[in-house]
Structures are given as structure tokens and as C-alpha cells.
Amino acid sequence: MALRAWALATLVTLLPAVGCKPRYSVAAGEDAAAAKPPAVGDPAPEFSLPDQNDRPVRLKDLRGRWVVLYFYSSDDTPDCICHATEFTELLFRFTDMNASVYGVSEDSPAEHRAFIQKFALGINLLSDADHAAMKRYGAWAPKAGEGADEHVVRSTFLIDPAGKVRHHWPQVDGKGHAEQVRRKLAELQGQAKGE
């Protein structure tokens, strides 16, 4: 039975992205809670990270726009392909809503360029090699279990034009997340117009 489970897990990681599958686990949820991300209403932590073209992207330079900032584990893995392609498919909708979308992982700018080219992605990807931004956003946490290594907590932040966190998804599944973010953005923008 254990051999079959190992073989299935190995096969899933080797398959190309054929669809997005939920992978939420209780342990992952506990990791996200332990990481202490900024609270809704708090100023979003500042960052300066290189994009796929080695150009610095600074949060302070994005004032006046909504920012979707999502953290993911690694380029070219099934869930991360799912996120990136779904955000790319909806990019025109986010642009129409005055929002920019950025994915953040520890991959290098060169790896991001290859990932973008391979899947014809339209979003920008940022490199956080030393995990500094991930730590400030609570997206770098210990794995469940004593003595386990740290890892990326797949999570998303919606930051308003004033630089405040307006919504946080502490644990993200692949399929449908981009649309979930788009709907929340529309809801928040509707509230802002009504204020």
C-alpha cells in the first residue's frame, strides 16, 4: 500500500499540468497560521524584488494600483503552473480593474523567464531568493513535524492602492483561485465606491 502511494505521488509530480487539483491539508493550514502574516487593514510590508527581467519591483512604486501578490513554491510544478496560467487568462480583467498581478517564489529571474516562455505567461514573476519578502508576509514557515525544513506557504494578498492589505488567503488551492481573487477585488472596489 505504501509503495502504491509513493508511486502515485511520484507519477503526479512527473505529469505535465493537466488540470488544477486542490491540495489543501490541515498541516499546511497550521503552517500558514504559524507564519504570522500581516493582518487585513495593516500596511503591506515593503519589498524590492527583481522580476523575470532583473528589473526591481518595489511595492512603494505601485501605489495608486491594486496589487495581487501571490507566493508559490516553484516554477514549472503542477499547482504553480495552474496559478500562473489562470492569472494569465484573467490578466485583462485585472488590468481593467487597475490591478497588477505578481507571483513570488525563490526561483531566479532566469528560471522565471524560462517558465514564462514555456507557458506563454502574461504575469510578472518576482525572485525572493533569500525569502526576505516571504518572511515579512508570513509565507515562509516551518514544515509540520519536529526538525523539518522551512518551505513556502502558498498564499495570496490583495493590496489596495494606498498600500494596505485588504484581503489574505492564507492557504491557496490551485484551480479557480485567480477567479476567486478577481471576485474579491470586484467586491472590495464596489465597497470603496459606496463609501
Image: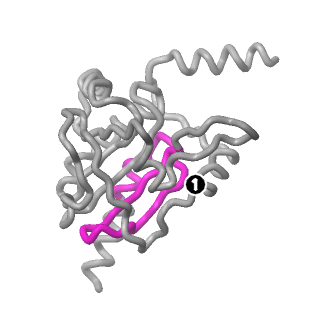
- Residue 189: horizontal and vertical position, in percent? 29, 71
Residue 136 among those drawn in magenta: no
Left-right relation of 128 to 8: left
Q: Nearer the viewer, residue 129 or 44?
A: 129
Q: Quadrant of residue 66?
A: bottom left
The residue type indicated by label 1 comes to Ala
Left or right of 26 in this view: 59:
left
Is residue 97 toward the left or the right of residue 181 in the image? left
Q: Residue at x 34, y 56 (%)?
A: 182
* Number of callouts: 1
Q: Residue at x 48, y 51 (%)?
A: 135
Q: Residue 51: percent from the left, percent from the top?
A: 24, 39
Specify the color scheme. one colour
The residue range painted magenta reads 153-182
Residue found at x 26% / y 71%: 162
Residue 148 position, x and y percent, is 68, 36
In the rendered image, the vertical position of residue 11 relative to residue 176, given as above or below:
above
Q: Residues within 10 Å of mark 1 (few under 14, many from 20)?
A: some
Q: Where does the C terminus fall, quadrant-wise? A: bottom left
On the image, the x and y values in percent for residue 144 come to: 70, 42
Q: Which residue is mark 1?
A: 35
Q: Is residue 173 magenta?
A: yes
Seen as rendered, the residue at the extreme right is 1
